[in-house]
Amino acid sequence: MAAGTQLPGNDQTIDLQQQVARLQALLEATRQVHSTTSENAVLDQVLRIAVRELEMAGAAFPGTGLSYGDQPAANGAPPPAFALNDHDGKAMTTLVVAPPDGRTLTIYETDFLEGLSLQAAVALENTRYHKRNVEFARLEQDLDAARQIQRSLLPQNLPNIPGYSVGFRSDACYQVGGDYLDIVAQPDGSLLMAVADVAGKGLASAIMSTVFRSAFRGMAVTGMPLPELATRMNQHHWSEGEEARRRYVTAIFLRLHPAAGEIEVVNAGHNPGFLIQPGREPRQFEAAGTPLGLLPGMEYTGESSTFEPGSRLLFYTDGLTEVFQGDEEFGPERLLQEFSACPSCKADGILDALWTALADFSQGGPQGDDMTALALCRSAGEMPA
C-alpha cells in the first residue's frame, strides 16, 4: 500500500474516538460539578472545565463576578451562551464562553457545553436546596431553643395554697406562641394571676409576650391595685411604638386573697372569665376595657367576688373556643358547659377534661391557635380563716 494511503473508515474511527473522549470528559466534568455543595464552587468548576477541556480562551457567568481566562468579547457578535435553567425552566445564570481566536464553536464543543450546562444547572439547584435545608435546620434549632426558653418562663412551681388547687396548661400552635400566663406572690400575701394573648401567632407574638412579661412582673411586685396595674400596662404597651400596638394584648388579671376567700378580676379586652359557685348561676367576668396597647389613656375597673368553698374559676385564651369540627366552632358556650359539668374538683383534673373534650370535638384536626388555660378551685368544706 502506497505511503499516505488511508484505510477506509479511518476518519470515522478517529471521529468516534473523539466523541468517546468528549463523552468521558463530560462524565468527569459532571462528577466534578456535583462534588461540592457551594454555589460559587460549582460555577467556578464549570468555568475551569470549559476552558481547560475545550481549550476556550475564557468563560464567565455575567453578573456574578465569576470568570476564568479571557473575558468573552462584548463587541461584535454576541459570544456563545448557555443558560443554566432550574427544573421550572427559569434561568438561574448563563455560561458565556470565548472561543480561541473568535472562531465558531464546533458541533462537539456545543454539545459538550450544552451537556455541561445541563449538569451544572442540576448541581447549582442542588446547592441552593442544600443551603436552604441548612438554613431551615438552623432555624429549627433556634425555634426549638426559643420554645424551651418560653416554656421556662411559665410558672415552674405552682403555689401550695391550703384548701385551693391551681393549675394551668399552655400549648403553642407553632414552636412558640403569643399566649402568656403567670402567677406572682404579692407583698400582702395575696396572689396575682394573669392570662394574656398577644395578637397574632408565632415568633413575633412570642417576642412581644416576653416583653409583656417583663413589664407585668416589674409592676406586679409593687402590689398596686389591680385596675391601676391594667391601666399602666396599657399605657406602657402603647408607648412601645407602632409595632407593639399592632401586637396588642388581651389580658385578664386575678388577685386571690386565699385567707379571706375573695377574688378581684380585671378583664382588658379578653375572653370572659368563668366563675362557678355552688348553688348559683355561672358568672362571667366580661371585658372592662379595650385590649392593652390598643388605645392610649384607657382606664380599667375591676369586679370583686367571694370565692366560697366548692367554687371554681377558669381563665383561657381564644384558642380553646376556636377549635373547629368542620365549620362548627367549639365556642365559649360549649366551653362553659364542659367546665360547669366537669366532675373533678381539682384544677389539673378540670384542665385534663377540657383538653379531652376539645380533642374529641376536633376529631384530630390541626390546632389553629395557641391554647392556654388557668384553673383555680377551692375545696368544698373549706371555710375562710
Image: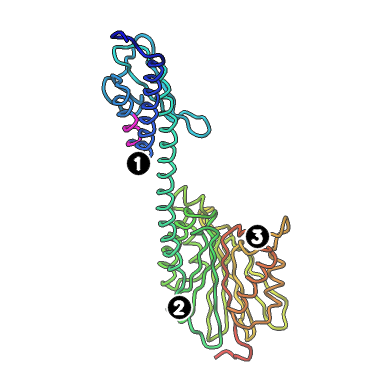
The residue under label 2 is 157
Label located before the other in sequence (2 or 1): 1
* Mark in front: 3 vs 2: 3
Q: Secondary structure at mark 2?
A: loop
Label located before the other in sequence (3 or 1): 1
Q: Are marks 3 and 2 in contact (CB under 8 Å)?
A: no
* Mark in front: 3 vs 1: 1
Q: Amino acid at mark 2?
A: Asn
The residue under label 1 is 36
Neighbourhood count class around disc 2 (C-alpha, 10 Å): few under 14, some 14–19, many 20 upward: few
Q: Secondary structure at mark 1?
A: loop
- The percent coordinates of residue 36 (x first, y second) are 35, 41
Q: Amino acid at mark 1?
A: Thr
Q: CA distance from mark 3 to mark 1?
A: 42 Å
The residue under label 3 is 365
Query: What residue span does the magenta drawing correspond to?
Result: 41-46
